[in-house]
Amino acid sequence: MSDTRAITLTVNGEPRQAMVDVRTTLVDVLRDQLRLTGTHVGCEHGVCGACTVLVDGEPVRGCLMLAVQADGRGVETVESLAPDPAHLNPLQAEFVRHHGVQCGFCTAGILMSLTAALRDNPRPTEGEIRETLAGHLCRCTGYQGMVDAVLALAGR
Amino acid sequence: MKPPRFRYDDPATVEEALDLLARHADGAKVLAGGQSLMPMLNFRLARPSHVVDINRIAALATMTSADGGLRLGSLVRQRALERSPLIRERSPLIAGAMPLVGHPQIRTRGTLGGNLAHADPASELPAVMIALGAELTVRSARGSRRLAAEAFFIAALTTALAPDELLTEIALPPWPARTGAHLLEVAKRHGDFALGGVAVTLTLDSLGRVAGARIVGFGVGPRPLRAIDAERSLVGGAPAPAAFAEAGRLAAASVDPPDDIHASGAYRKRLLGVLTARALTSARSSIGECAA
Amino acid sequence: MTPPASRTPEGGYIGAPIPRREDARLLTGRGTFVDDLEMPGVVHAAMVRSPHAHARVRRIDAQWARALPGVLAVVTASEVDDIQKPWPARMPSPVPGTTVRHGVRHTLPRDKIRHAGEVIAAVVAESRALAEDARDLVEVEYELLPVVATPAAALAPGAPLVYEELGDNVAAHIVQRVGNPERAFAAAPHTLRETFRVMRGGGHSMEGRGVVARYDEALDAFTVWDATQMPHAIRAMLAYLFELPEHRVRVIAPPDVGGGLGPKGSFYPEEALVCWLARHLRRPVKWIEDRLEHFVSAAQEREQIHTVEIAFTAEGTLLALRDVFTHDIGMYGALVSPVITACTVPGPYRIPNIHSEVWAAYTNLQPTGAVRGAGRPQGVLVMERMMDRMAETLGLDPAEVRARNLIPADAFPYPVGLWFRDGAPLTYDSGNYPELLRRALERADYTRARQEQVTLRARGVHRGIGVAICVEGVGLGPFEGAVLRLDARGRVVVTSGAPPQGQGYQTAFAQIAADAVGVRFEDIDVVTGDTGAIPYGIGSFASRVTANAGPAILQAGGTLREKILAVGGHMLEAAPADLEIVDGAVRVRGLPDRGVPLAQVARLGNGGVAFGMVMPGGLSVGLEASAYFTPSQAGYSASAHVCILDVDAETGEVTIVRYVIGHDCGNVINPLIVEGQILGGVAHGLSNALYEEAMYDEQGQSLASSFLDYPLPSAREMPRIEMFHLTTPSPINPLGVKGAGEAGTLPVTAAIAGAVEDALRPFGVRVNRMPLNPARISDLIHGR
């Protein structure tokens, strides 16, 4: 006996519907029911940032939002950034050029945070970039490649 | 780490929410931004029978001017506070504190009321509210009451909220003339909960002497603590480094934090003293020129 | 369209900073990690873990758990009795004449629980949430036993025993000696003695552990997708527990593994349980470790306490070293880290007399293994702190004192005199430590930094400079293999056993193979981590893969090239010596129109004549080559770090002003990848220096079991790192490569400890314990 609800949300520009348990988080519904597995789950307490997606354009911890709370909202995940691996967007292309990815587990969340931040401020300084990245943990890269990627994108 | 089962309601009005809380008082938890409650649900440290999700209650998310001051709905997002020109103009202490609260991704969903109701001893906003002399409106099906912020925070993770009560509004008095404010903290990592911190306000009179001060330490005890002796020591005197240093000493003397896994009590005590003096200096600078 | 990969000026791919092929799929959310695998009918496991560190289970009652709708099974030790075989002993002591005393454990505890977080039962349900609901309903009655939660407690007389059969808690006591330390100390003009405590923590790769098992009843075989660093070792354990031949247990590391860092390089009970449950239920079973589980049950490194003494002359020349230390093995640890620590302490210095002694103790805490650095950071810390203290005692500059003791560049191969963890004599293969240090100091403007320090100090700014130089054992054997073949599409498929967790093998291996076979980088596919694709492998740990798999690929690639040219030569009626491979075809040199595409070469070479079944005379069939490279010994990389920082003496906060790294890992296959590895290692080292810290109470309870209490640095905490490379090729393998995966981690704790102590010298502060944090630094200043 568990509450379930029907939700309708826009995901990466497309309307999606799902029957969800009220206790299921947004990231689990995105991954398990909508099969958008690009977003990952790293800590389930809001610190690591791997689960970060955009809800109505703002970065949100997918592990700290119930899926039912996304009803009627617009969600953007990493899958929205490029049509396929052969056509990376400029941010992604700079990540490749500057070796901003190693294992890739933290990457999706970071790309979404950066995407939102860059919409507000397309030419961030290094300090501003690191401030946006401060809400993300990466255990592989030391972050320098990511910072360099965004600096390059910003034309600095 | 998946949440345990719970019944879920998302009322559209305050009255509906209060009715739910009244009916399920002992087993209900209010879900606002979720940045504090969701981790507890995920860890199964919280096992509410009912979750009352108040995010649909638009009436709780307003920010208005009132009598020269501000009235902030409890559901106002931290991000909104951070970006608001009204806050920047009317409450520089809040504006200065927001970048230290978590990270941008937390502030998107996190709310003012949720942060206050969670009452983590190392959290910034409770101290800020006390420093500003905020008054909190708390409602239940039984009625409404207004508390000074100081009376709202009781102990670690414990407020004056009864199980059937909802924090609805935070009222800030007008920002006095010739007033500066500053918040300083030390955390192991930027955005983490503070090892210790202080929120200060400093008001000068027309002659440039200290007319009033608030010094509120956080992370140094189970709840934010006003250093009353330190505040009093400043009144009537010049806003000078020596006075600030003395206020710092008195603030440190007023707390006796225990040791814990993150810091010794002695450190937290010293830290309060140091940060108080520095914050007062910054607060003074932000006031601008005054008749000496 | 991706432009072709760039080559070096010499025309090869090895050495070129080619951006990674892995990136596009990872950046677009198309990676395949273990939790992304979709398996029809999959069900989900949750582990019931003991909350107590040392206890017997009197009773487990799962009836309410089993009754919950959606729950398929709850199993305890009695249900899985058929796989309850004693786990084989772990790594023996590499030092002749010493033993590791092996405490016997099983998949589920038979006699008693030995750490908080140990699995005592498993639940399977239609969803993870339901499995956790059922887990809440499992009732367990414990009989608590007294706990030993530190090596000191465990080694004290009369301590409660982790393994009764051993009679005490000594997992190993290993002594190594070089020369005559006693005589050297007795005769020395100067000696110094210090005690250091170094606490580390978990791996905390962003992806935790995870395994999905599928049992095929018709074949009596398992396919196991496991986010592991060592699929072949997992296969061996599963084959042993389930009494199956190895070819009926296939272990595959998924195409993407979200970081390894050491903890994924062990075998765990969950892997066996998930397989058992898959066979029992005839449904695929998935278990994904959550962060809390990683905190309380994944392998980690904890505290070492070193009492170290050095003997030296008035000029600062080292005469002898004595290091006695304790190491916390946990309830089932490996000796890897402490042995490596012991071997790392002497570092890049000439030390003619050494006494090294480690007491590895069993405790009621989770197993320790290796976490990036694997015991080396602790060894580096100890030696570098003593070098600083020696400098201070003699009134010498710390960099100068190091320079006076460095093994000179012409002294290689350099035998240290100790046994390394691989059971071979510790012998440095190549290096140029004096040049490495000199260049690091030059790059950091060391002389000017010291002058600036004086000026700043006079203004009340507490500036400190820390220098650390270290040697790192890498490229551990016994082997790694590669199988290369030319497939029907004319592409070269490279298969190796060691799986990547972010190190970029799909790119680096393709670079080596492309040069070895002489084809384009774009024409190579790389397959890793599948025991079904290559019969033997060791795994990805210990900074060993490039140095072992690389030469194997090189060798197999060369052999494959010969076979391709033999077949191509037949088709073109030309001698192989007159042929070249260009743009996907075998061509006669100088006659670009006389060529045959590789796909056609494959058709003949792999399948015989087009219209017949007969291979042309003299041609052997099968365009495939395999090689297993066995290094004669481990290799030795080296790093020098210079850290310049300021300490706020009132708050204890540290601000890093400048951080310079010089690194020598021999020849470099891909500079982009190597730099990334170093930077990642530095972040981990920084975390060990100033942020993360494993903490347990006397009852063996973790006091920091979430990221809220266990900080890891973000981009905001990381300084910008300046890096340069020195290259002393390794003579051990034909590529001249060493290893770089862990290097960044090694000297950071030492450099930061040294810099903080240097900054606070006016206060007489002594940094003898790591990690530091603002509270500890402030307490040190105030005499605590």
Image (cartoon, rainbow, N blue to C red):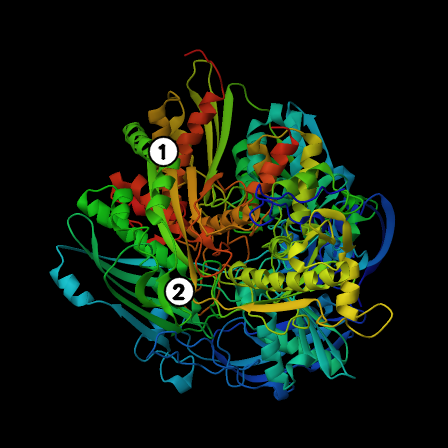
- Report crowding for label 1: few under 14, some 14 to 19, many 20 or more residues within 10 A (C-alpha): few
Q: Which residue is mark 2?
A: C340
Q: Which mark is residue C445?
A: 1
- Name above or below for residue C48 compared with residue C399: below
Residue C356 place in picture, x, y as percent = 29, 67
Q: Position of residue A25 (x, y in %)?
A: 73, 55
The foreground one among A94 and B73 is A94
> What percent of the width, then of the height, locates residue C764?
24, 44
Residue shown at the point (57%, 38%) measured from the top left:
A130
Amino acid type assigned to the residue bearing label 2 in the image: Ile
From this viewpoint, is residue B164 visible? no
* Quarter that holds the N terminus of chain C: top right
Q: Crowdedness of circle 2 by 10 Å Cα count: few (<14), some, many (20+)?
A: many
* SS class, disc 2: helix
Q: Residue at x 73, y 43 (%)?
A: C2
Q: Nearer the viewer, residue C482 or C50?
A: C482
Which comes before the other along the chain, label 2 or label 1? 2
Q: Chain of mark 2?
A: C
Three-letter code for the amino acid on which mark 1 is drawn: Asp
Tell me which chain the residue with mark 1 is part of.
Answer: C
- What's the CA distance linking mark 2 and mark 1? 33 Å
Residue C584: x %, y % from top left: 74, 52
- Count of numbered circles in the view: 2
Please, is residue B195 above or below residue C287 in the view? above
